[in-house]
Image (cartoon, rainbow, N blue to C red):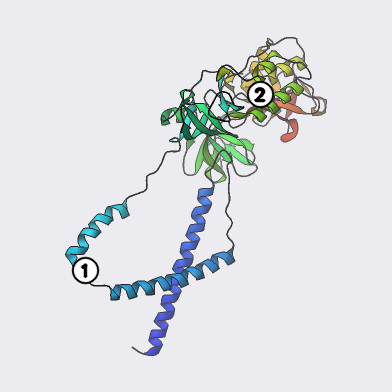
């Protein structure tokens, strides 16, 4: 073989090897980016790797690979030859271990579920005893991650709370139960995403959603996700959303105090017995009633707004009409007004025609604010609202101008 031929082959081999390392590095970056999108409590994480770092890493990997290869070749040449009989048993022993697929753990496997009655809660303690501080509350149908055990207590993490709950109040090892309390949702990754009536870009547009909006998933396919809206079921392109499971989680002491303060401010000084009862922690037992509600009274828009604010923090349930156990946006408005003897349709579109219209600049507490595919209730002349927002936030406060208003309707 001539010298030029040898040089050519060496160069080709080096280029192939360098290419293999760079390709492997590129594959690693791709996998890291894909894996980063799978988290829902706080949903998106991103990894940034600069081109210069990737190239430098490839060069170092190439040099290290060449050195390891040379050392391995030398060791093999100097080592005594093994017979086929001696080598075979060792290969037979290691082969199953090398080919064994890693165990894939269900996302529901490490979830514990609150073992309390509806409209009840269990205290979360700072330590594993009943004499220490209460750091939060875990309500019915809420989930925790069990971090460990200490005597008859579980150490748990849920939402913004980490602490201890007696084992009798947490159900573990039941994946079906954990799955049953989860909600499959699609998180929107772009603005002005169309919800279509059919699985095609030519389908009728039922409405639009924006980045970070949360949609209830009915069915998943590679290209289209079927979702539920107040106007019925529709489809969004799978490439513009990512799906995950949402769990109701604990409420920390600080979050509870902030919620109660907002409720009091929204009721404009009209104090209710529910605020007092829910703000007190149980001192004698670990379990208590979550909340009681003042009955509807009066007949003004402000009375309607004050009544509605009691239900902030309760869940969003598509198709639901329960102010305590879950309602969607139109179901929430319908049930609030039903308590005052007013019958409204269970449809955000149909609510655009109820009562009489007023301008957005004139809206006042009790007015119904209609959007594209959504409705809310005005609770303040400054534009503050209360509405059944999404599965991840439930019934919450907001600002009327967070999206374009179609019409404002007044009942009282």
Q: Is residue 129 left or right of residue 291?
A: left
Q: Is residue 87 left or right of residue 165?
A: left
Residue topped by disc 1: 82
Screen quadrant of the N terminus? bottom left
Q: Quadrant of residue 301?
A: top right
User: How would you rate the neighbour count of disc 1 (Cα within 10 Å): few for under 14, some for 14-19, many for 20 or more?
Assistant: few
Residue at 33% from the left image edge and 74% from the top image edge: 73
Q: Is residue 234 left or right of residue 70?
A: right
Q: Is residue 205 visible?
A: no
Residue at 18% from the left image edge and 68% from the top image edge: 83
Residue 349 versus residue 294: which sits nearer the camera?
294
- Residue 39 placement (x, y as % from top left): 54, 42
Q: Quadrant of residue 3?
A: bottom left
Number of callouts: 2
What is the distance, in whole Å, between disc 1 and disc 2 at their CAs? 75 Å
Residue 283 versus residue 141: which sits nearer the camera?
283
Q: Quadrant of residue 381?
A: top right
Residue 369 versus residue 259: which sits nearer the camera?
259
Name the residue at the left extreme. 85
User: How would you rate the neighbour count of disc 2 (Cα within 10 Å): few for under 14, some for 14-19, many for 20 or more?
Assistant: many
Q: Is residue 289 left or right of residue 8?
A: right
* SS assignment at label 1: loop
Residue topped by disc 2: 312
- In this rendering, the answer to whether 286 lies above or below 36 is above
């Amino acid at each position: 073989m001539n010298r030029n031929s040898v040089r050519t082959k060496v160069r080709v081999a080096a280029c192939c090897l360098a290419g293999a390392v760079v390709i492997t590095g590129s594959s690693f970056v791709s996998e890291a980016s894909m894996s980063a999108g799978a988290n829902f409590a706080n949903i998106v994480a991103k990894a940034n790797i600069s081109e210069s770092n990737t190239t430098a890493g490839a060069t170092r990997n190439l040099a290290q690979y060449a050195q390891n290869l040379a050392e391995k070749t030398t060791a093999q040449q100097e080592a005594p030859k093994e017979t086929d009989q001696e080598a075979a048993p060792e290969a037979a022993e290691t082969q199953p271990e090398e080919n064994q697929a890693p165990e894939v753990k269900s996302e529901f496997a490490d979830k514990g579920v609150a073992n309390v009655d509806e409209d009840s809660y269990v205290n979360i303690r700072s330590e594993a005893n009943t004499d220490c501080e209460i750091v939060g509350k875990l309500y019915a149908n809420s989930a925790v991650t069990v971090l460990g055990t200490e005597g008859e207590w579980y150490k748990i993490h849920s939402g913004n709370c980490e602490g201890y709950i007696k084992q009798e109040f947490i159900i573990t090892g039941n994946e079906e139960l954990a799955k049953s309390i989860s909600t499959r949702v699609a998180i929107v990754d772009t603005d002005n995403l169309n919800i279509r009536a059919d699985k095609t870009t030519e389908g009728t547009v039922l409405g639009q959603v924006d980045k970070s909006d949360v949609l209830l998933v009915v069915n998943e396919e590679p290209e289209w996700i079927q979702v539920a809206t107040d106007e019925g079921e529709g489809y969004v392109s799978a490439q513009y959303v990512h799906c995950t499971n949402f769990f109701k989680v604990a409420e920390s002491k600080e979050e509870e105090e902030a919620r109660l303060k907002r409720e009091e401010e929204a009721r404009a000084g009209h104090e209710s017995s529910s605020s007092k009862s829910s703000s007190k922690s149980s001192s004698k037992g670990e379990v208590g009633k979550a909340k009681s509600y003042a009955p509807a009274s009066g007949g003004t828009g402000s009375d309607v707004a004050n009544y509605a604010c009691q239900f902030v923090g309760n869940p969003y349930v598509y198709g639901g009409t329960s102010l305590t156990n879950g309602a969607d946006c139109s179901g929430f408005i319908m049930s609030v007004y039903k308590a005052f003897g007013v019958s409204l349709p269970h449809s955000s579109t149909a609510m655009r025609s109820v009562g009489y219209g007023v301008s957005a600049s004139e809206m006042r507490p009790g007015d119904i604010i209609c959007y594209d595919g959504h409705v809310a209730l005005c609770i303040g002349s400054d534009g503050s609202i209360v509405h059944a927002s999404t599965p991840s936030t439930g019934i919450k406060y907001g600002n009327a101008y967070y999206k374009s208003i179609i019409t404002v309707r007044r009942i009282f």
